[in-house]
Image (tube, helix red, strand yellow):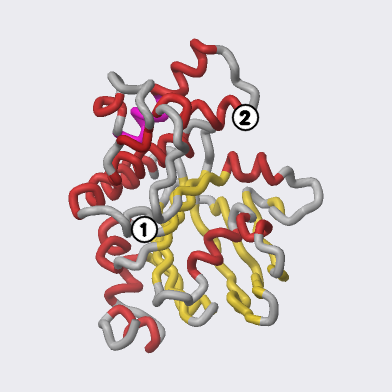
Amino acid sequence: MSEIMTAKDLCLWYGNTQALKNVNISMPEKSITAFIGPSGCGKSTFLKTLNRMNDLIPSVRITGEVCYKGTSIFDKSVDVNELRRDVGMVFQKPNPFPMSIYDNIAYGPRTHGTTNRVKLDEIVEQALRGAAIWDEVKDRLKKNALGLSGGQQQRLCIARALAVQPQVLLMDEPTSALDPISTSRIEELALQLKEKYTIIMVTHNMQQAVRISDNTAFFLLGELVEYGKTEKLFSQPKDKRTEDYITGRFG
């Protein structure tokens, strides 16, 4: 399996505070990689570095490199909009735009120049089907997306990310605001999506990492402590700190 994203000696500071310390990791394509660790350990910061979301924070300084398909994402030639189209993001709290379900999904493709109605209709249907929500919303596409339940809104946000045909989907604790039934729907969806896309997710739920991820990275205080096959990391952790965290001694 080839690697789609890699980080080498990646360090990140917010002002004088170092949030990431020499992170080295390679993430294989068409698989699910989970980041676990206690709150404030750097996992969301690292996730947001992968599509340069941290560029939006003024005091951030980054050293080291992150490569997407072999090219440094910090290279001057990289168009950040193109990068974010290829490496999409789904946030912790569902954040649909206050517009119709249809316009939420068509927003990205329109931004990238698709205006043909027939083509947009096709993209909207495909994306909603891809996010396993088409059957629930197909008769109410003109209705405001904010009228959907939390779990539906989160699947809508996944559909919105899929509409621009990304290669990688970053998910920042995508189920932490959802009930157990919506959570298991999103987990099933992630397992289906990895046949076509690479999924990199932050989760505070270790059972979730065990249930759906292929590889798991454990972060602690800005450091990547351990990374490997999920099954192995949870059954035979190499580092004492990993073992303490997964057995509930701290965190």
Q: Bounds of the magenta span?
A: 126-132
Where disc 2 sits, the SS reads helix
Where disc 1 sits, the SS reads loop
* Residue 62 shows in the view: no
Q: Is residue 77 magenta?
A: no
Residue, disc 2: 111
x, y percentage for residue 236? 31, 78
x, y percentage for residue 71? 70, 51
Residue, disc 1: 214
Pointer 2: residues within 10 angstroms few (<14), some, or many (20+)? few
In the image, 180 versus 188, the foreground residue is: 180
| Horizontal side of residue 146 vs 42, given as left or right | left
Q: Residue at x 69, y 53 (%)?
A: 73
* Residue 228 shows in the view: yes
Q: Residue at x 28, y 63 (%)?
A: 210
Looking at the rendered structure, the kind of residue marked 2 is Thr
x, y percentage for residue 161? 48, 39
Considering the image in quadrants, where does the C terminus appear? bottom left
Looking at the rendered structure, the kind of residue marked 1 is Asp
Taking 107 as reference, is 27 above or below it?
below
